[in-house]
Image (tube, rainbow, N blue to C red):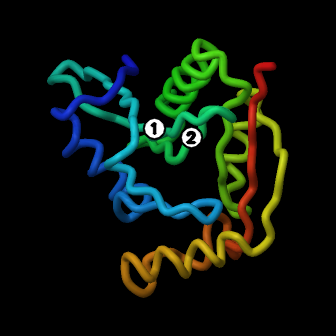
Amino acid sequence: MVVREATQADAAAIQDVWQQAWGGPIVVSHGVTYDLRSLPTDVAIRDDGTGAAVVGALAYVIEPGGLEVVAVSAITRAGGVGSALLAAALARAEQLNLPRLWLITTNDNIDALRFYQRRGLRIVGVAPGAADTARRAKSAIDGAGAVPQQGDYGIDIHDEITLERRFD
């Protein structure tokens, strides 16, 4: 597997990744609405012998306070795609001498919380009710019912959890 910066030739495959993961390219997090199509994106490429294919994507924003992972998704879980994408983002943040890499997930996403913590990120904040606010904002953009109220393991989605890995 290779992780590289996305090119225009990857656009359709990336759109498919975002559609499967998020229901489209619009993500609302910590009060900000992102169009993933406008963000820098890394892709994971795997060649299964029949040709290379995009198997995951990670969209991010770089700001003075750090590199924010806005969205990360793999076509299939537990295949090393997410690990490779996150490792590339961590390396980029360190190379740019940024103080941290950070991201937000929701309270229902137990598998992601485990995944990120095992890779050195720590929980640094909880925003009670922020996912409820984001759901209303995204529904207004995408249409009613675009964001589920219940997530992984039957857990109601209400809160945003911030995780980070500091480099300073």
How far apart in space, not on screen, are marks 1 and 2 (Cα)?
Answer: 7 Å
Q: What label does residue 69 carry, if any? A: 2
Residue 134: horizontal and vertical position, in percent? 59, 72
Say whether residue 113 is left or right of residue 35: right
Task: Classify mark 2: residues with Cα within 10 Å, few (<14), some (14-19) or many (20+).
Answer: many
Residue 65: horizontal and vertical position, in percent? 69, 35
Confirm whether residue 1 shows in the render: no
Element carrying mark 2: strand
- At x 44%, y 82%, the residue is 140
- At x 66%, y 70%, the residue is 131
The one nearer the camera, 111 or 140, is 140
Say whether residue 79 is left or right of residue 124: left
Say whether residue 68 is left or right of residue 47: right
Instruction: Decide which of tag 1 and tag 2 comes sooner along the chain.
Output: 1
Residue sitting farthest toward the bottom: 144
Quarter of the figure with residue 109: bottom right
| Image quadrant in which the C terminus is located | top right
Say whether residue 114 is left or right of residue 16: right
> What's under tag 2, amino acid-wise?
Val
> Label 1: which residue?
58
| Image quadrant in which the N terminus is located | top left
Q: What label does residue 118 carry, if any? A: none
Classify 75 as above or below 145.
above
